[in-house]
Amino acid sequence: MKFRKILMLSAIVIGTITSCKKTKVVPDVVTPPPVTPPTTTTATRAELTKDSIFLYAKELYLWNDKLPTYEVFNPRKFTTYPASLDNYEEELFEITKYSNPYEYKPGSTSSKFSYIADKADENPKAIVKSASVDLDGNGNDFGIRFGFYGTTANYTIYVTAVYENSPAEKAGFVRGDKITKMNGATFGVNFDAQYSAILTALNGTTIKLEGIKSNGNNFDLTLAKTVFASKPIYKSRVIDAGAKKIGYLAYARFSSMTNSQAGFDAAFASFSTAGVTDLIIDLRYNGGGYIETAEYLINLIAPNSVSGTVMFSEHYNTTMQNNQATILKNQPLLDRNDKVQYANGKIVTYYDYIANPYSVANNTSRFAKKGPLNNLTNVVFIVSGNTASASELVINSLKPHMNVKLVGLTTYGKPVGFFPITLENKYDVYYSMFETKNSLGQGGYYDGFVPDYSLSEVPANTIMYDFGNVNDNYLKKAIDVIAPGIVVTSQAKTMSAREKSLAVQSSSVINSDLSDREFKGMVENRHKRKN
């Protein structure tokens, strides 16, 4: 879950404040919290960073009231690994255990929400370790999202998505292509034994793929990892369902407004021109992203009548709401060009950019209608276990105001968000900081949203269709929810030889982590609008 620096430039690590000199890019020294680590001249850089990870959590973490004292926690004890980042990650994981049962449950091996990132890996020109495309649409990969369906004994590998401008798109891959071989080795049986080889193939700089195209033709193609820029909209179209005009939009991630707005505006303009009265928003693989972009999509969908009313609110911990998180004086608030800002000769920080910045009142968003689509009746969201965070925020915010239905599988369950805390000018720490609630005060969906219509993406003995194809199992059901009984396209009663060659044997997804290597989160990036 790596993506490039969003909001921060530098941070003072608490244990070093006695030795740091003021510069034009570092905020003034502040008094440390009441419980402080031992300050010694022999402390290492890594030890001081471990101190900071804990001390920031004591003030910023959503469940900070559950954390023990510095002395009890002892952040400097994390020395298991030779690499500093591995020890920092172990410490952060230990911090998140105190949230039980929210982002940690007994037996978990990693935090569900919080994480720490090496800023070098967030650069798309570096190696993107956990994401094919970052939130600004920058990729450094093959440009394919793979899906593994069936059982561990007998499974099918599908191309589930292809990213714009990627090597895969340029080679002609589309959603629904079936992979039978990677780098000359045949896959599809004994997944557990083949997992390591699959991972090696996906992490290579080149990959040779063989299989069957969705049109029935065989393929044998080699892709090379390349840096590319991708837009986040997979597909948009208007579907005629009897007397109804349905707008369909498949959206990959809540990318930056720069990367998303033009596509949104074009899609909704076409919906308006066609007389669309109902929407299907496909977020099945959308793990979230920027709150600013989610807010824009909500305003495109919402009716005019709700303008000015509450959309959602962010709820920080009591320490932050009472403006007692003085540690944030160490975090400069950069402008939209990532430049340090000054007011009255002092650097503007996350602590003081407005009065009481983390109160509920100052973090309540209201509807402000956007776009030409004003008379929507229904909106159906296509969702899955990969639908997370900002995607769930859109759904939850619209529920009190429209007829909202969900088709697919239970969503990820991430009602919390964050902004990054920078340490050593090298690491961005993403603590769970706030929970969002809609206008009715509804939130807390840590176990995800259960769909109104729960069904498999690719039922057994069927095939995968591209985004927007009305034979797609999710889309077909979504259309039926809006226009019951209307058959848009009839499927053949018997499968053709081509379809049989592409069919999945079982509908289960056998490894969602390997399939979904993109960011999951909800990034509060709107502070820059408020200063």
Image (cartoon, rainbow, N blue to C red):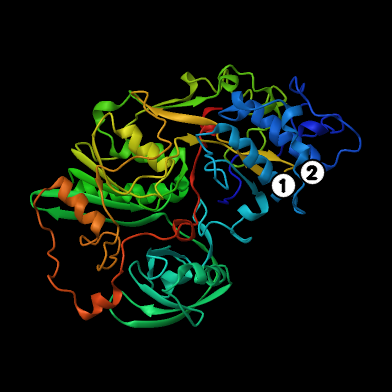
Above or below for 156 versus 276: below
Q: Secondary structure at mark 1?
A: helix
Task: Out of 327 and 505, give the one closest to the viewer.
Answer: 505
Q: In the depicted view, which residue is nearer to us: 449 or 121?
A: 449
- For label 2, the SS is helix
Q: Taking 364 as reference, is 507 left or right?
A: left
Classify residue 295 by image quadrant.
top left
Residue 439, horizontal then vertical, whole percent: 35, 24
Percent of width and height locating residue 503: 28, 71
The mark tally for this picture is: 2
Asked if one can make out residue 204 in the rendered structure from this viewpoint, the answer is: yes
Residue type at the position of mark 2: Ala
Dot 1 amino acid type: Asn
In the image, what residue occupies the spot 17% across and 43% down?
277
Q: Give me the disc on residue 193.
A: none
In this view, 231 is above or below 98: below
Neighbourhood count class around disc 2 (C-alpha, 10 Å): few under 14, some 14–19, many 20 upward: some
Q: Are marks 1 and 2 in contact (CB under 8 Å)?
A: yes
- x and y percent of residue 190 in the render? 45, 71
Report whether 200 appears left or right of 74: left
Name the mark on residue 46.
2
Residue plotted at (29% across, 66% down): 464
Q: What residue appears at the point 49 percent right and 21 percent down from the top-left corner?
A: 362
- Relative to residue 205, is residue 325 depicted above or below? above
Tell which of 370 and 2 is nearer to you: 2
Which label was assigned to residue 87? 1
In what quadrant of the picture does the C terminus appear? top right
Left or right, 120 with respect to 263, comes to right
* Residue 405 found in image quarter: top left
Q: Could you classify mark 1 by the number of other residues whose Cα lies within 10 Å: few (under 14), some (14-19), or many (20 or more)?
A: many
The answer for how far apart the CA atoms under marks 1 and 2 are is 9 Å
